[in-house]
Amino acid sequence: MREPARTYNQSHAPRPETPGRKRASIYISWSYPGEANRNPAEMDNRFSTMTEVRRVLWPAYEVPRFADPLQFQQGIAGSLELFFWAWVPFQDLAAQVTGHPVPVFQRVDQAGFALPLDERVLGDCDVLFLFSLDHNVTCQTPSAAEIAALRDWLGRPGTLLVIGPHHDVGATDDPDQRAVEYAHHGDLLVPRQQRFGQYAVQLLQALGVPVENRWAFRPAVREGTGNKIAPFEAYPQNDARGWLAGVESLNFHMHLPHYAITRDDGTAVVLAKQPIDPNRPHPFTASGESAFNTLVYAPPAGERAGDVLVCDSTVFSTLFGADESLERFWKNLVS
């Protein structure tokens, strides 16, 4: 069976409100040109080129679909397209559950069209997945108007913001510590410094959600499975919405962020902690820690009637696979 026809470069058609069914959208807070046009000669704070991906992961992408320069982009833009490929299974499942398509918006897209976070994104949305994969050096910061629009949207009962500032690797000038962090996660495609998520962090601050992304941890795996992630430690007393019902683990990724709660006043609570690979030293584990916060929940507070879940974008990507537990989590969020 052939793939359906693909469309691009057209305006979004708003989805009607349907009783009992959520409308989910994805918003990527990067500037696509700002990421794709980074100088490949710079070592840090950029995505890999597709050529680098092919070299490191050889022979996984040595097929014409990805290796032929007449068919697939070989620069940084090519590796960015892998993200879109890997989100499709989540989009398809969410569409099946909700009966609505799941559009993907970008703050600045491939063609240079800018789309700030406003009513065009939020007007027909009940569950917003905000993936903050913007490198800090690209200076993506939410405007006052964007913050106000998000606050207004979260004032509507039943809304859910799933927001994920990505990892923060090498947040130090000490090259020795950067080397330790690099050896810990073990991903040859990640630079010694790769700092993400300024857009999401500033939104969280504006919403009064005391969470910051720190570090990048390689999770522990189930013995004898290679890269099957170990089950997380859940805190069911904090799971007021039942998002973790039937869920025991998410998916493996070599560098997952720790979502540190910066204020202990109950405005944010841990839903799940992920065990860290005990065989790979890291400054965080040297201080006695053995797990990181992988899911954090901020319940409604004040004028905010909607929920906020802090969760990394890789949880919705199939670059490292998916299983029944992960798909159950996806369904729980959009049901």
Image (tube, rainbow, N blue to C red):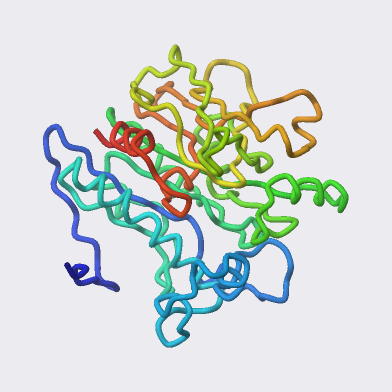
Q: Quadrant of the C terminus?
A: top left
Percent from the top left, x then y, of residue 181? Answer: 76, 46
Q: Is residue 174 left or right of residue 40?
A: right
Q: Is residue 31 left or right of residue 191?
A: left
- Residue 237 visible in image: yes
Q: Residue at x 62, y 66 (%)?
A: 56
Percent from the top left, x then y, of residue 113? Answer: 40, 71
Q: Is residue 277 above or below residue 12?
A: above
Q: Is residue 185 above or below residue 20?
A: below
Q: Residue at x 57, y 65 (%)?
A: 57
Percent from the top left, x then y, of residue 237? Answer: 44, 12
Depth check: 165 or 248 in front? 248
How many numbered markers are drawn?
Answer: 0
Depth check: 31 or 114 in front? 31
Q: Residue at x 60, y 37 (%)?
A: 219
- Residue 153 visible in image: no
Percent from the top left, x then y, of residue 253? Answer: 55, 46
